[in-house]
Each structure stands twice: as C-alpha cells, then as structure tokens.
Image (tube, rainbow, N blue to C red):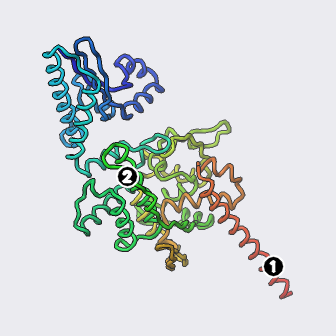
Amino acid sequence: MAYINYYLKGALSKSNIQDLSRTAEGRTEIKDYQNKLLQIYISISSRGTRIKIYTKQRVEPKNWDPDKQRLKPRPKIEYINNTNKWLNELYQEVSDLAVEKERSSRRITIDEVRNKVNGRLVKYKDNESLENIFNSFIRQHKTAQGNPISSLTAKQYTVMKNHLVDFTELNRIGFNLDLFEEQKMSRFKDFLYDHAELSDNTVRRAITCLKVFIKYLASNNYIRDFDLSTLKYSSNEGEIYVVPFDILLQMQNAEIENTNLSRVRDVFLFQSWTGQRYSDIYKMKRNEIIEDQNGELIWDLVTVKTKERVRVPIIKYARQILNKYKNEADPIPKYVEQEVNRSIKEVGEKLGLNWTEKIILYYRGKPKEEQVPFYKVLSTHVARKSFITNALILGVPERVVREVSKHKDERSFRRYVKFAESFVHKEIRAAFEKKYKRSKKL
C-alpha cells in the first residue's frame, strides 16, 4: 500500500512554535515565519521506496493546515481554491500510478512522479488566467533585501497591468500569456508613449515593472524567455522640489480652520522634520518614540522598505506636532498617502504657496516645460526631499543625513548635495551683490 503526503519544507513543529512563543523575540520570529512562502513537497512511500519531490507550489504557513495537508479553505481567495484543486488532482494521479505499480509488483520511480508533477504544471498553467498569475506574483514578489513589496510598489505593478489591459483592448487581442513575446512587447512600449502619452519617467517605471514580471513568468515556466534588450526607454532625472525651511515654519504656525486640512498639514510637516518614507510615517507607533541617554526624544524604528533600524532625532518642531496628538491613539494622524498628496496641495494653496515653479517633463527625450503654482508640486516625496535638502543647506554633514534618510543609491543622493550647494552659492552671490549695491549708494 502506498502512503502519500504533502508537507512544507522548513516548517516549524508545534513544539518549536510553543518554545518560541515564550519570548518577545521568538514571537517576532513566529510572525515572520508565518508570512514566509515555503515549498510544498509531495512524499510517496511504496514497496520500500520513499520519494520526495518539490511540487513547484508554495504557501505561507499561516495558510497551511498540516493535519489536512492542504491550504486552509477561504472561499473568496481564488488562488487557495485553485492550489487545493491542483494538489487533489496530483494526489489522485500519483495514487493511481502507485496502485498500478503495486499490482505489477514494480516500484514507483522518482522520474515517474516528477513527470506527473510537470504534466500537471503544464495543464494547470495552460488553464490559469493571467489575472490569477499576476495576483500570485504580487503575493510572492520580494524586494532585493528579501522583504515583501510595499503597497506603493504593488500599486505600480497594478498600474502596469492596467496599461497591458488597455493595450490588449485597443488592439483586440487576448489578455493572456500569448502577450509576452518580443514583437508585442515592443508595440506595448510604443503604446505607452504614443497612445497613453506617458512621460519618459512614467514609461520607465512601467517598463521596469514589466521586465520583472516577464522574468517571473519565464522563471516559473509560464512563457519562454526572450530578449528584453529591445524594451529600452528614455530616462531623465526629475526635478527636486523643496519647501524652504522658513516656509515650513510659516506652515506650522499658520491657523487652518478646516480640521482635516490642519491634520494633513501636520503629517506633511512631521515628515519634513524627520525625513522618513511615508510608509514609515503611516506605520509609526507610540512605543517607537523613546528617550536617549541625554533625555532627548528619538524615533527608533525599523523601516518598512529595507527593514533597517533607524534612530531619528525628534527636533523641536516635530516634538510640537507629537504634543498636539499626545491624547490620541496614534502619535500622528493616519491618512493613506493618496489623501495626503491630494489635501496638502489644498493646504498649500490656502497658505499662499503660489510662487511659480517650472516643471519639466520629457517625452521620448524631448523636454516639455510647464509653469505651475508651487503648491501643485507638494507631495509626501517633497516632504522627504525637503528634509534632506534643508539639512544639507543648514550644514548637517552628508554622512549624518544619509544615516537618517537611509539612501542606498549614491547617485540619487548626490543630486540633493548638488541642489543644496547651488542654493548656498546663490545665497552667497545674492548677499554680496546686495552689499555691493549698498556701497555704491554710499
């Protein structure tokens, strides 16, 4: 009689989990473990032969039932139902093979089981919708540091997918795996420029996401690999927009009658005083605000994007904002990033941040300039850039600023340094020219 089982490779036993749960560090390890994708293996024991093979399926331990050896049923989550169906069908095929072998007094071989797994993969993938594959990709995709992607990154991939849908509808072709071949992808790039009329940097983001998705499809045998070098794009660095230090102070001291806008203003300013990514601002907890050995407030956090520990000094102006919300559940108000980006522009308009700002967008390498009021460029990215640039202008050493901002890319950080230097040079020239004009009058 054949014994067939499924199990997760690297799974913790119940006793291991119980031991870990006794300490705070262990409980954190359990939480990370429960969300880590583990490989599903099939094990077959028959006539003295034991075979173990990776099924090419993976699942988080929190979604796995070790007793039933299947994913925990969740009717509204399609990939769980599909995976369980796949496992059931493979189990039946391997079981039938084992019975056939035992009847003929032969042993089942690892190649025969592997053929069953691969054969089912082909059938499964032929029938799987591109939408389901994309959703699986979003769940499984990790950053270079091995961390789950942020909601903002997931949104960028979704925007890319929506462009693909628009492309297929315009050209009356199917939204399926047949899309991913060199000629169609080249046409898709032209579609982004010519039909969607996207700027170079927006096309760059879409193509970058597309290439990662294509590599995922190829590595998981959904499609055949093809040359991606034809998917080239023009890339130009965006402008750096900065709210000057004195304007930040004016914003903080301004009276805003609308409660919602006042709270959004405070969130924007807190980011401008601390320089952290909005994903970290949004997830900030009270127990992360501590005192250092000198009694000064520190924001001690582990970043969402890179999982690095950062100790951010809470300067006077940031502390004033924290004091405003000391009786609320969260240290500062919580808003989704889109709401902050939308409302801070209204705040800027009400506070008179309407000096003219030049915006330069590039389309296939050709610049297109537009003059807009400054408040229209306000965003959470501008808040972070304002902290970095103002800190450099005020003389904070580059090494210290990078320690707080956690910029990995030297090239991108140098842009802030150059911007700060140009500002200082401009101020020096203006000061000396002003002095020169006074001396001429005398």
Where does residue 347 sit, x and y in percent of width and height?
46, 68
Q: Residues within 10 Å of mark 2 (few under 14, many from 20)?
A: some
Please, is residue 117 above or below residue 167 in the view?
above
Q: Is residue 260 left or right of residue 111?
A: right
* Rendered location of residue 6, percent (x, y): 26, 25
Q: Name the residue under label 1.
A: 435
Q: Earlier in the sequence, mark 2 or mark 1?
A: 2
Location of the C terminus by quadrant is bottom right
**Picture residue at 31% right of the left edge, 50% below the top:** 134
Which of 409/9 is in front? 9
Q: In this view, does 326 lie above or below 195?
A: above
Q: How far apart are marks 2 and 1 (CA)?
A: 61 Å
Does 127 sit left or right of 314 as displayed?
left
Badge 1, how many Cα within 10 Å: few under 14, some, many 20+? few
Mark 2 or 1: the one toward you: 2
- Kindly identify which numbered label has been placed on residue 61: none
Q: Nearer the viewer, residue 191 or 266?
A: 191
Observer-nearest of 245 and 152: 152
Residue behind mark 2? 214
